[in-house]
Amino acid sequence: MSVLQTPLTQLLGCEYPVIQTAMGWVADPNLVAATCNAGGFGFLAGAVMTPQEVEQGIIAIKEKTNKPFGVNFHMYTPGANDIIDTCIFHGVKAVSYSRSPSKAMIQKLKDAGIVCIPTVGALKHAVKAVEMGADAVVVQGGEGGGHTGSVSSSILLPQVVDALEVPVVAAGGFKDGRGLVAALSYGAAGIAMGTRFLMTQESPVPTQTKQHYVKAPTEQIIVSKKLDGMPQRMINNPCLRELQQTSALGMLLLAVKNGLAFTKITGGSLVDMLRSGWQMKQSNGLSFGQTLMAANAPMMIQEAMVKGHPDKGILPSGQVAGAITDLPTGAELMQSIIDEAQATLNNLSTLM
């Protein structure tokens, strides 16, 4: 197994170069702990939590595992500084994020010895992330679920690997040991998976929602900009089809409703929400409409992932769900990935 030790395992202190991503409402303490205990590295989905809930989640994970783990959060949310302080206080190994408003926030984490590993979907964003201080980068190809780019992993991954000197982690379209070996062959230091971990026994997603993922045909896992004006990959279900027919005014009203609800969940105020939206607009080139609609995704995902209404909520998913037909435990999944990766490497060695 020494061949599977990479710069990523050295950086994060995990046994295998496999990251479980921080899916909102999905990556809870149970899933994170199960991933870490199986030898991978899990991230807590702090982006849909208050700072107090993030701390509770960190404590809960520590009760279930003594392995290193990470926390994901949005650095534009009102409680971001509190979450940073909490991560430092509890000695969290790493943080992940998609956008950083300032180098100062990154430097504060780095000064505390916390690994900063953002997720990006484009070459220019990967370069910018490292300029801001990232220690490693997760690069997601267009096959990935949720917010995603337009370039496939097989094209984007080697571009980013060639451009950066920090470890690069491949995401988007990975589910098994063959995919891990493929990513390593491109120069990646490991893989990050969301949908594959969502489809495990420890995932808190209700059974009826998981069954939608198991049965989803690959061609029905599509990209739409309807939810918040940015491309997101989701399973095409009744809720999404209804949204596609909703007028611009209807989407605006929905955004206001969801924005207020999300602000309440994350412990902020209306003023905080507007301030955060303005910061996102200024730093990321988003339109005013896109910033207003940013809360649509988490609130509509909650309907399916927490409340168990898969036809009434959004189902973010990578295309890879169309190739997954089982719901293993985290330990079974990790063992199968490592066994298959080792077998694949052995088979490749016979070609030399």
Image: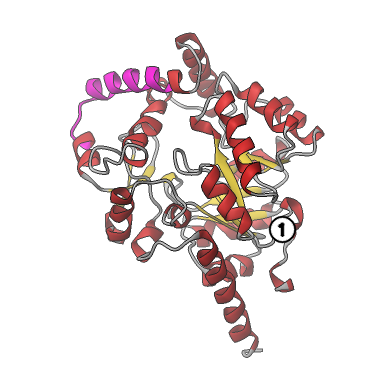
Seen from the viewer's position, the closer of residues 155 and 14 is: 14
Quadrant hosting residue 75: top right
Residue at figure coordinates x 40%, y 61% from the top left: 327
Please give the range of residues in magenta: 244-262
Q: Quadrant of the N terminus?
A: bottom right
Residue at figure coordinates x 55%, y 69% from the top left: 337
**Residue 86 as seen in the image, left or right of residue 251:** right
- Relative to 287, does residue 322 appear above or below in the rendering? below
**Residue 114 as seen in the image, left or right of residue 95:** right
Quadrant hosting residue 185: bottom right
Seen from the viewer's position, the closer of residues 68 and 74 is: 68
Amino acid type at circle 1 is: Thr
Residue at figure coordinates x 62%, y 89% from the top left: 351
Q: Name the residue beneath numbered marker 1.
A: 9
Q: x, y (%) of residue 41?
A: 63, 52
Residue 352 falls inside the magenta stretch: no
Q: x, y (%) of residue 38?
A: 60, 60
Color encoding of the figure? secondary structure
Q: x, y (%) of residue 33?
A: 59, 49
Residue at figure coordinates x 46%, y 38% from the top left: 24
